[in-house]
């Protein structure tokens, strides 16, 4: 079963190395990460969507590369490292969604 978490990073600019520790992820987990500029909307009465705001499809290029899951039980915390790219002249708020899929079936060399 897929599991997802959404993270708001405030004031991001350039290429930033990120790490998110999460026990749903281990070294063999398949991980997909999406990113977008974001307009937060804090407040409200609750009971609505979990995401407080909405993605903004502006002119800035916002994307993720170099996704590297990590974690071996008893040795290292589970999670994922990645590079967040925010190509804009000033810092932007960005939302990242990390989705942990199932473990890989095999590791091969080619």
Image (tube, rainbow, N blue to C red):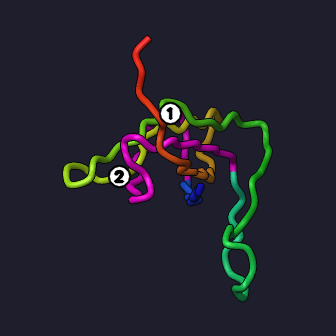
Asked whether, in this view, residue 36 is left or right of residue 13, the answer is: right
Q: Position of residue 39 (x, y in %)?
A: 72, 59
- On residue 15, the disc is 1
Asked whether, in this view, residue 23 is left or right of residue 85, the answer is: left
Tell which of 68 and 10 is nearer to you. 68
Q: Is residue 91 above or below residue 24?
A: above
Q: Residue at x 55, y 48 (%)?
A: 101
Label 1 or label 2, whichever comes before in sequence order: 1
17 within the magenta span: yes
Disc 1 versus disc 2: distance between alpha carbons? 23 Å
The picture quadrant where one finds residue 29 is top left
Q: Position of residue 107 (x, y in %)?
A: 41, 27
Query: Which of the image's four quarters has the N terminus?
Result: bottom right
- On residue 78, the disc is 2
- The segment highlighted magenta reads 11-37
The picture quadrant where one finds residue 4 is bottom right
Give the crowd class for mark 1: few <14, some 14-19, many >=20 residues within 10 Å.
some
Q: Residue at x 20, y 49 (%)?
A: 75
């Amino acid at each position: 079963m897929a599991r997802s978490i959404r993270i708001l990073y405030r004031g991001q600019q350039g290429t930033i190395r990120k790490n998110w520790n999460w026990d749903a992820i281990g070294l063999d987990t398949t991980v997909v990460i999406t990113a977008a500029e974001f307009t937060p909307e804090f407040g409200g009465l609750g009971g609505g969507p979990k995401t407080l705001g909405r993605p903004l499809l502006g002119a800035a290029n916002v994307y993720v590369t170099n996704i590297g899951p990590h974690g071996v039980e008893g040795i290292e915390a589970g999670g994922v490292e990645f590079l967040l790219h925010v190509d804009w002249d000033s810092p932007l708020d960005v939302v990242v969604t990390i989705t942990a899929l199932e473990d890989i079936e095999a590791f091969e060399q080619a």
